[in-house]
Image (spheres, rainbow, N blue to C red):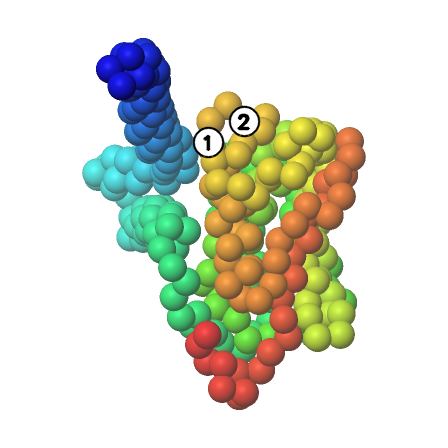
Amino acid sequence: MRLHLSANQPRRREAAELTAAFDRRRASLQRTQLELIAAERLATIGRTASSISHDLRHPLSAVVANAESLCENDLNTDQREELYREIRTAVDQMTDLIESLLEFVQPQESLRRAFGWIDDTLKEPIHQVKAHPEFHCVNVSILREGRCETCFDHKKVERAFVNLLRNACEFVPRDSGKSLVSLRENKNHLEIRIADNGPGVPGPIREKLFEPFVSYGKQTGTGLGLAIAQKILQDHGGNACLESTEPGRTVFKLTLSILTCGDGILSS
């Protein structure tokens, strides 16, 4: 009996050593996983901060420049009012950016729908994008087929248009840049296409365009604009996607359901 116990002792020690090694390995993997999660969180914070600083830089510069101009003594009333309007526009742009970021990270809230024409909703986004010094020479035009009206949250859809138009203008030639927004009715939904004459989207990035923090061909920015735009369209029951791209022509397609606010959908 003693010989039998003695023969099992090496096996027990080996099993104990294997168990201890396994526990150490598991603990090491858990530490590595926690470190990777922490590193990814820090990287996400860094990418978010970079994107926010990039998008805030232009309106903040406008606020500072116009505020300094207001201190000049030789301005008349009309000039002061114009500077004030420019400051107010820049502040509104920063507010919209903050609200869009909150919208992206928070659950869907009720949409404040109102009936209206989509081309009317495009006017302010085009003005905002064209106000950027780099995009002054870009020709942005609208082509409409049909009435193109529905019940939607005007403020949020404006934000989606700003993001998509700005994305288009960032890649077109500075001296001959063009962007065409075409609207048409298709049965029970609206189709909005935003086309530009830029170089096209590189193949490796096409399937990831609408993912958060995906960016391509930009010096700064981390690609939140398209992700936010797609979320806004999806909250409306529609979608945003890259329809086609090639050198000289890239087309983003947006869809919105044709609804009437008299059907009990003042919010959804």
Q: Residue at x 46, y 80 (%)?
A: 266
- Alpha carbon distance from label 2 to label 1: 7 Å
Res 15 seen here: yes
Asked if residue 82 shows in the view, the reply is no
Dot 1: within a 10 Å radius of its alpha carbon, few (fewer than 14), some, or many (20 or more) residues? Answer: many
Q: Quadrant of residue 136?
A: top right
Residue 79 screen position, x and y as percent: 34, 48
Image position of 232 (left or right of 138): left
Residue 169 at x, y percent in the picture: 60, 38
Residue 218's disc number:
2
* Residue at 72% from the left image edge and 57% from the top image edge: 182
Query: Is residue 128 shown above or below 21?
Result: below
Q: For this rendering, which residue is in front, 28 or 5?
A: 5
Given residues 95 and 191, the one toward you in this image is 191
Q: Secondary structure at mark 2?
A: loop
Q: Could you say where residue 114 lies in the image, as x and y percent from the top left?
A: 49, 76
Instruction: Say what amino acid the circle numbered 2 marks.
Output: Lys
Nearer to me, 165 or 238: 238
Q: Nearer the viewer, residue 125 or 44?
A: 44
Q: To which residue does mark 1 refer? A: 221
Which residue is at 60% across, 75% downward? 150
146 above or below 6? below
Label drawn at residue 207: none
**Would you place residue 13 above or below residue 267 in this image?**
above
**Residue at screen point 68% across, 67% down:** 190
**Number of numbered discs:** 2
Badge 1 amino acid: Gly
Q: Which residue is outermost to the front?
A: 1
Q: Tell me whether circle 2 and circle 1 mark residues in contact (CB < 8 Å).
A: yes
- Could you classify mark 2 by the number of other residues whose Cα lies within 10 Å: few (under 14), some (14-19), or many (20 or more)? few
